[in-house]
Image (cartoon, grey):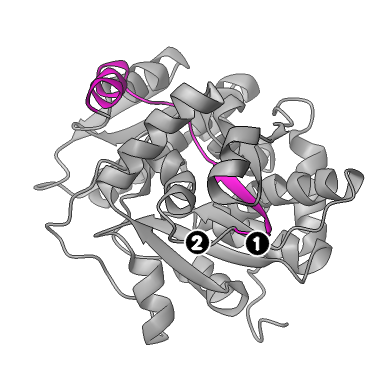
Amino acid sequence: MNFPGNTQVPSFADIEAASQRIAPRAVRTPLLENAYLNEAVNGRVLLKAETLQRTGSFKFRGAFNRLSLLDDSQKAKGVVAYSSGNHAQGVAAAAKILGIECTIIMPNDAPSLKIANTRNYGAEVVLYDRKTESREAIASKFLDDRGATLIRPFDDPQIIAGQGTCGLEIFEEANERDMAINAVLVCCGGGGLTAGIALAAREMSPASQIYAVEPKGFEDTARSLAAGKRLENAPDAASICDALLTPSPGELTFQINQQLLSGALAVSDEQVREAMAFAMRNLKLVVEPGGAVCLAALLAGQFDAADKTVAITLSGGNADPAFLADVMTAT
């Protein structure tokens, strides 16, 4: 399958190069299996535990790949990113390793843990009100004043290639274990991880179906796939899945996902809470809301895993401790 006229779509060679680039710094996260979960869904589930990735989410992959490709002049002028937390931490950690000054623009309602962690990586954090202020406008000022480079959260070829290393690892390990993966469920916000894994699957496991999983109210990828064009979420939409609250699919990521995905699923906040509690009690893993949507889709029967081998991403583990305690108490 080709992408006519679009030279921005990363190739599989780009994903392989990203894998080599990030290997000294990123964690090759395990592909876990749990007998209790397999029994619960009557299938075989492979858990890609990006909760154990550096900074606690897959975002470090794309961030480190992108920052590594900056030239010396760009590195000297620093980088700017906007994020509710996981991209922020990934960029901040990568910038610290590479000795690059970093400014992160974060909504003031982002989880306090993510704000604190971003600052702890040495980034300058600028808070804004997402209801009344534009993060793009704030970023533009820093870019103009400093000549810094904007590190986009998903709509960037080298970010997508970096996230694609997650898929490369899934299929490499599955092949090593002589397992054929029927489907991969991917946590989806702007679509960078989904697009990267889909591109890896096209080369390594073309028979595997790829599904995006989103929070209800933010199922813009699902609606866009159905409409055949990019659609936006309602401005008053709300969800506990802070890591996945993008206004619409990315332009580049949607071009990829529109051609390569088998579909998209949506889960409720209550289903996400139940999945977080399940992960803590039965998998012994801390999973944040946005990172738990694929597990939620399986447990809620949104995807039928019976007699199938299904890989899912647990894309982040940066759960606010107080929120997690509330989830465990109430669920």
Q: Position of residue 201 (x, y in %)?
A: 73, 63
Above or below, comparing residue 184 to residue 328 in the picture: below
Q: Residue at x 56, y 30 (%)?
A: 76
Q: Residue at x 52, y 66 (%)?
A: 253
Please say whether residue 325 is one of the residues in the magenta stretch: yes
Q: Position of residue 170 (x, y in %)?
A: 74, 47
Q: Which mark is residue 278?
A: none
Is 264 left or right of 39, judged from the image as shown? left
Q: Quadrant of the C terminus?
A: top left
Q: Which mark is residue 303?
A: 2
Above or below, comparing residue 217 to residue 148 in the picture: below
Q: Position of residue 259 (x, y in %)?
A: 59, 79
Q: Position of residue 138 (x, y in %)?
A: 25, 43
Give me the C-alpha separation between circle 2 and circle 1.
10 Å
Which residue bears the numbered disc 1?
183
User: Which label sits in the foreground, 2 or 1?
Assistant: 2
Amino acid identity at mark 2: Phe
Query: Callout 1: 10 Å neighbours few (<14), some, many (20+)?
Result: many
Amino acid identity at mark 1: Ala
In terms of secondary structure, where does tag 1 sit? Answer: strand
Please say whether residue 44 is one of the residues in the magenta stretch: no
